[in-house]
Amino acid sequence: MILDRRAWLQATLAGAAGAAGSGLLSQPTSFGFGAEPGSSTPAQPLKITGLKITPIALPDPPLLANSGCHGPYFLRTIIELETDAGIVGVGEATAGEKVLHAFEAARPIIVGQNAFAFRTFAKQLMELSPACYAGVELACLDACGHASGRRACELLGGPVREQVDVCAYLFYRYAADNPTLLADKRRVDSRGSGDKALDQWGEVRTPDAMVEMAQKFRDRWGFRCFKLKGGVLDPDIELATMKALNSHFGGKFPLRIDPNARWTLPTAYRIGRSLADVNLEYYEDPVIGQSQMADVRRDSGLKLSTNMCVTRFEHLPDAVKLRPVDVVLSDQHTFGGITACQELGTMCETFGFGVSQHSNSHAGVTMAAMITLAAVIPQLTYASDTHYPWLVDGADIIEGPRMEIRDGRMAVPSGPGLGVRLDRDKVARAHEVFTKCGMSGRDDAATMRLIEPGWKRDLF
């Protein structure tokens, strides 16, 4: 028997409803693919009826970067896409006032639209903010996955890998119970010192301490690739850290270093030449701009990568001419969704660039999205960065335990859509923290100046 499209989707939903006990077929007319008899307007397969946006704040350890020191919270935006079927698709995006305003402006654009046809409103939402479109696209994919009983990766052409390699992201840092940081007026939770500290990693500001932490990452999560966030200490200390990591692991594991363009050109030349005897996978953004990056690449002979000088499609023509990097770090939030990153993968392959994946502080919905992204881009052959190990135990906003990292890999979630669901109690608590802490954006410099008054982001 050949089913028409409406019957096919209803049959699919019946199977999903039977498994979940959700009774979705109590509203069968919500899923008509064709028009109702006598209607001149085609019915939508999965009509968007609402968009709920919830800003949240999650505890952030005092990690050090070129911008200063993280803390006390990182902000994210949780998206819930409501549909006429009662299915709610979830997404997660970056945060800040501009992003929240973009989502508010997106609501009248997408309500009434077909969730399966999310590319039809891509241009309008991208003009508001790439992060806004990326979050809505993600929620659409999740909703469509639940409607069809399929994983998001299957809606995007199918996974090319079921296990995704991830890279350990190593940060210099202060101890979580640093007294000055505990006195931060923005802190509104019960974190304290000793056993009540946010985490037990302690202070890491020397090569030996970094090696010790890297070994713990290896023991706990099985990482087989290690990235050092540089641009923090004296470049010679960071070079010594890279050499110590390489020596400790016997050159077995590839290393990366990312000074976030805080080095001058002479420093980048000098350190680059000294990295020649390290098992270096790539040298990420030692200097600012494509022209200087190209100079360092020619001088050092090393592979260079970026998430700073090629972060939008309009950056690619100059990159093809100047050849500043060998590897481009994709990011759904800046390029405009997973589908945009699929296009980026094809373009990078055409022009001879490798592909990896950028990360910033995030919760479990983005982690599921990152795994999905890496699963559907054949060209993404470098392990993806992830901040997920830095998410404080118990702070994730998804149901159940956090997703597992084993042997430096993460499995593509097996459930429909993104394969994760929101824990609404945790989301509510995270939103309450957002309203109380008074943070409207990230300000690492302000946190750094609590410990080092007068700190400035001077170049090394």
Image (tube, grey):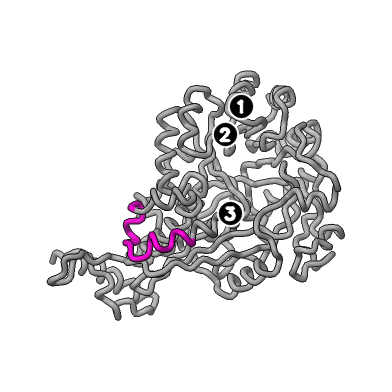
N-terminal label among 3 and 2: 2
Image side of residue 86 versus residue 170, left or right:
left
- The residue located at (34%, 49%) in the rendering is 157
Magenta stretch in the rendered image: 104-120
Question: Observer-nearest residue: 454 or 28?
Answer: 454
Dividing the picture into quadrants, the one containing residue 4 is bottom left
- Circle 3 crowding by C-alpha within 10 Å: few under 14, some 14–19, many from 20: some
Q: Name the residue under label 2.
A: 309
Q: In which quarter of the image is the C terminus?
A: top right
| Pointer 1 with pointer 2, Cβ within 8 A | yes
Is residue 133 one of those drawn in magenta?
no
| Pointer 3 with pointer 2, Cβ within 8 A | no
Q: Which amino acid does label 3 sit on?
A: Arg
What is the secondary structure assignment of the residue under circle 2? loop
Q: Distance between the residues labelled 3 and 2?
A: 32 Å
Q: Name the residue under label 1.
A: 293
Q: Name the residue under label 3.
A: 406
Query: Residue 131 at x, y = what percent?
Result: 51, 52
N-terminal label among 3 and 1: 1
Q: What residue type is labelled 1?
A: Met
- Circle 2 crowding by C-alpha within 10 Å: few under 14, some 14–19, many from 20: many
- The residue located at (64%, 23%) in the rendering is 296
Mark on residue 20? none
